[in-house]
Amino acid sequence: LMDLRQMISTMEVGERLSPERELSVKFQVSRETIRRAVRGLCEAGVLESRQGSGTYVRKQVEQAVAARTKTKLIGISVPTVEWPTIARVVRGAEEAATEAGYRVVLAHDYGKPDLQLSQIRATLAQGVDGLLIFLDWDNVSRPEFAALLTQLSTGTEKVVLLDRYVPGVPIPCVMTDTVRGMYELTQHLIMLGRRRFGVLSWGPKAGIAERNRMMGFQA
């Protein structure tokens, strides 16, 4: 929540944050939304949670975040940069960002879905102007991730998904046209006289890209 970060930037160091019930009313969002935003700010070091006492503003990190808010930053979250496709996407995004006067904050989760979730919250807490997300495979179907993306779709940050989308979540996604690719491959084999095909698939657990390939195959 950008409004929450702005409010925190005006508070004194060591000042106690209002209870989430009051913040929920103030910003007209659910308590769960406030809870997630506060958790992300704690993970980023902006806030400090003290058991049995409350949540407080931390000086050194708060000042750093306030300074970064004035800097053009684009966050990129990916599973790994070891995949050639993702590496090329990251390189292209960084080149485009540099040309436009932006800087890039890159986070990769080494294939750990929970880590990607916390990394995204921490990146948002830094005050980035936009966020590119290449979802970890397991996060495509996780309810908590869908809830986070739904929250982001109504926020001030600009978010774009890369190659993997979450059904029902209104966030734009830039994807490889795997439906058409599989369709044209199948048509090519048919033109060569092939009539019997075998397709290896993960089945019901398949990711979005693989499901789209099956759509192209069955078209």
Image: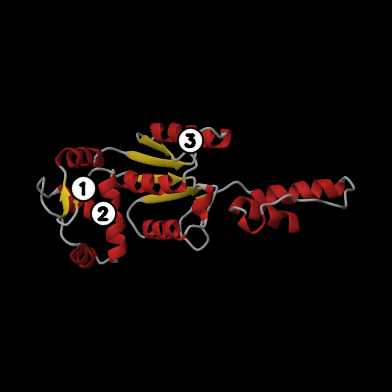
The residue mark sitting in front, 2 or 3, is 2
Inspect this view and state whether residue 2 appears. yes
At x 15%, y 50%, the residue is 56
Q: Is residue 25 above or below residue 9?
A: below
Estimate the spatial distance between the alpha carbons at disc 1 and disc 2, rounded to whole Å: 8 Å
- Residue 113: give x, y in percent of width and height: 46, 48
Relative vertical location of residue 73 with respect to residue 171 in this rendering, above or below = above
* Percent position of residue 191, x then y: 86, 48
In which quadrant is the C terminus drawn? bottom right
Give the structural element (helix, strand or loop) at label 1: strand
Residue type for callout 1 = Leu
What residue would you read off at disc 1? 47
Evaluate if marks 1 and 2 touch, with contact meaning CB atoms under 8 Å apart: yes
Outermost residue toward the right in this view: 193
- Measuring from the top left, give residue 28's x and y in whole percent: 25, 67
* Residue at 22 percent of width and 45 percent of height: 46
Q: Nearer the viewer, residue 109 or 169?
A: 109
Residue beneath label 3, please? Answer: 90
Q: Position of residue 63 (x, y in %)?
A: 17, 39
Q: Quadrant of residue 21?
A: bottom left
Q: Quadrant of the N terminus?
A: bottom left
Q: Which residue is mark 2?
A: 38
- Inspect this view and state whether residue 1 appears: no
At label 3, which amino acid type do we have?
Val
Gap between marks 2 and 3 measured at Cα: 29 Å
Residue placed at 29% from the left, 46% from the top? 43
